[in-house]
Image (cartoon, helix red, strand yellow):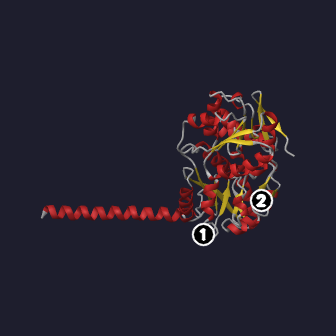
Amino acid sequence: MQKLRSLVGLSIIFVFMFSLVACNSSKSSSSASKPSKTEADGASTVNIGYSGPLSGPAAFYGKRTLNGTEMAAEEINKAGGFEVNGKKYKLNVVALDDKYLPNETGANAKRLLQENKTPIIFTPHSGGVAALQVFNQTENKFIIGAYTSEPKITENGNKLTVRIPPRYDGYIEPFTKYEMDHFGKKIAFLPTSSQYGKDWSEKLQPYWEKQGGKVVYNSSIDFAKDTDFFTIVTNALKKKPDVLFIGGASEPTAKVAKQARELGFKGGFIVMDQAKLDEMKKVTGSYDVLNGAIGVMPLVHSESPGIPEFIKNYKAKYNEDPGSEAGLNYIATYVFVEAMKAAGSVDDPEKIRAHMQDGLDKLPEDKKVYVIPKIDDHGGFEGELIIAAVEDGKIVPIKVK
């Protein structure tokens, strides 16, 4: 009998504890899905989503895109937030790791929508953007803040996608001209095996051949699986190329360039715009390894009005120089906020998207880390292409006509 009473007593305690946990869990889920109030000033919270690679070989790339958004949100909040229709708001960036896998991006977005009601979700890879475009215009609508230079993602008719960087096909002509003029017309392809790498290759190859060049080796590297590039780089160099076409996330791309030099390659590099010369230098140890490379101008060498203050604040926060990933996502976050103000809404994606030009027009001068005068009819930011080459171990600006 005593044993029975003990069992009954334990059962009651267990049921009570389970009820408390369920209650707390329900409360947490509910509060996450609705705009919350800050205790200090009563401002409502707008949740901004992010899904990108925060682990794996592209983790540094993903973290730096996220840094730009988080830094802008922190500045906006410290300044007291922003006002829409007489109501005060602050930003909360909710970031999830997708390991650079599009299926994970899609799953993350659904979670962000369900739990956090995010009107905007940033993602820094074209595969992830494509995964989100399957459902971002349906019932739970949201804007995709697309950090990819792939022009297809805004030209496919998706009206709730904003492409943040300049489209990559503008780089093909000046990159080709520089490398042919300085090194020769035989090229080996060793880009990332992602869809973005395939798209770049499909644009570069016919243009290179049209200029009288020859593709002597054509392959790609899966940076999610491969960490030693000795065999594939050796096979490419056997074809005696003058130029290597490389790219993907900066760190593994730099390792490909470094291994090519160690194997005796003396030619130039066309570096896809995803990889950044200054980020690659952190792996190679100096720009000397990258002599003859042409790519996107490092942000710290740019001359836009917001550069000095941005570099100072970024270095103070992250203890490193910022790259264009951080700079462009920083700008985009401010532009989205200005668009919300102009739209009179923080949660209607269609109204916010319709006022993106207002957002660009009203971007404060000291936040112009890059000068982006307009958004095109398809939803892509239009800014000047700023490129550079590495010559004698130094960054040299290259004029684009």
> Picture coordinates of residue 267 (x, y %)?
72, 32
Res. 357 visible in picture: yes
> Picture coordinates of residue 287 (x, y %)?
71, 30
> Picture coordinates of residue 305 (x, y %)?
82, 44
**What is the secondary structure assignment of the residue under circle 1?**
loop
- When asked about the image quadrant of residue 126, the answer is bottom right
Disc sitting over residue 108 in the figure:
none
Disc sitting over residue 140 in the figure:
1
Q: Which residue appears at 67% of the width and 57% of the height?
A: 145
Type of amino acid at the residue the image marks with label 2? Gly
> Picture coordinates of residue 106 (x, y %)?
56, 60
Earlier residue among tags 2 and 1: 1
Image quadrant in which the N terminus is located: bottom left
77 or 320: nearer the viewer: 320
Q: Which residue appears at 19% of the width and 61% of the height?
A: 6
Residue indicated by mark 2? 359
123 or 330: nearer the viewer: 123
Above or below, comparing residue 99 to residue 239 in the picture: below
Above or below, comparing residue 132 to residue 364 in the picture: below
Res. 41 visible in picture: no
Above or below, comparing residue 166 to residue 323 in the picture: below
Mark 2 and mark 1: Cα distance apart in space: 23 Å
Type of amino acid at the residue the image marks with label 1? Asn
